[in-house]
Image (cartoon, coloured by chain):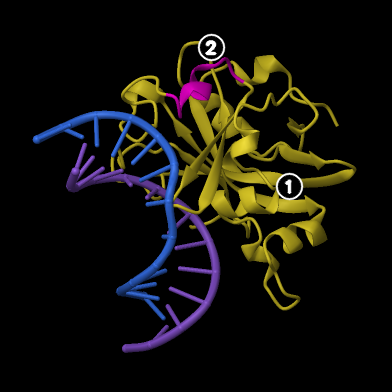
Chain colours: A yellow, B purple, C blue
Amino acid sequence: MNKLPRSFYTRPALTVAKELLGKILVRKIGDTILSGKIVEVEAYLGESDPASHAYRGKTERNSVMFREGGFLYVYFTYGMHFCANVVTGREGIARAVLLRAIEPLEGIEVMKKKRGFTEESMLINLTNGPAKLCEALQIKRRQNGTDLLGNEIFIVDGEKIPDSAVLRSSRIGIKNAKEKKWRFYVKGNLWVSKK
DNA sequence: TCCACGATCGGCT
DNA sequence: GCCGATCGTGGAG
């Protein structure tokens, strides 16, 4: 499995968002490997996007978004959850792709434990949401700014999702810029958060 | 100083 | 299916 190079991430956010579908997100915690196939993402286009954290410019919270592509932007939300974004584009321009859902592949038992799952819980609820996948993969405030070319969290090649299986829609859970169709997801995949 | 914003779960209805 | 609880961030007043 090849780790995606910096040049994958330094391209436009909408391009990276679409191409992240089918790739494998890998989280290493000591000797434990947790991974899943990315099946749902949303692009956020900085100062030109009213739904982006960077719409009104750089702040302490969103500063990672202004780095060059290939870093992880993690933020705290709803007083109890974290969400993870892949920073894209060039240094100084705030662009990011929110990771909304993954299909669990490796370390499912560990993810169940982190998510507090009992045996009868449905596996589909393990990682089918941006805060759920962060909890399953133990991504929290400490992981903000993580370099995706390092060994803690990274993304590797996966299957190529054909254009015919990539669907687009409005982004979920936002008040502003709902008309932008910047959410991408894999058609028919069980772990996609909503149809 | 206040207010808008934003996922998930459990418990009701 | 809806409702409440949970709270940090940043802009407006």
Disc 2 and disc 1: Cα gap in Å? 27 Å
Q: Is residue A113 above or below residue A75?
A: below
Q: Is residue A85 highlighted in magenta?
A: no
Q: For this rendering, which residue is in front, A41 or C4?
A: C4
Indicate yes or no whether the magenta region holds residue A67.
Answer: yes
Judged from the image, the secondary structure of the residue bearing numbered disc 2 is loop
* Closer to the camera in the image, B1 or A47: B1
Residue A113 image label: none
Amino acid carrying mark 1 in the image: Gly
Q: Residue at x 68, y 53 (%)?
A: A136
- x, y (%) of residue A59? 40, 23
**Secondary structure mainly formed by the magenta segment:** loop
- Label 2: few (<14), some (14–19) or many (≥20) C-alpha neighbours in 10 Å: some
> What residue is disc 1 on?
A36
Q: Residue at x 74, y 39 (%)?
A: A24
- Residue occupying image coordinates x 62% and y 64%: A125
Region of the chain picked out in magenta, as a range: A60-69
Disc 2 marks a residue whose amino acid type is: Arg
Q: Nearer the viewer, residue A5 or A67?
A: A67
Residue where numbered disc 2 is placed: A90
In the depicted structure, whether residue A7 falls above or below residue A83:
above
Find residue A36 and report its horizontal and vertical position in percent: 73, 47
Instruction: Point out the residue furthest to the right here.
Output: A31
Chain identity of mark 1: A
- Circle 1 sits in a helix, a strand or a loop, which is it? strand
- What is the quadrant of residue A37 in the picture? top right
Tag 2 and tag 1 share a subunit: yes
Q: Position of residue A99 (x, y in %)?
A: 57, 41
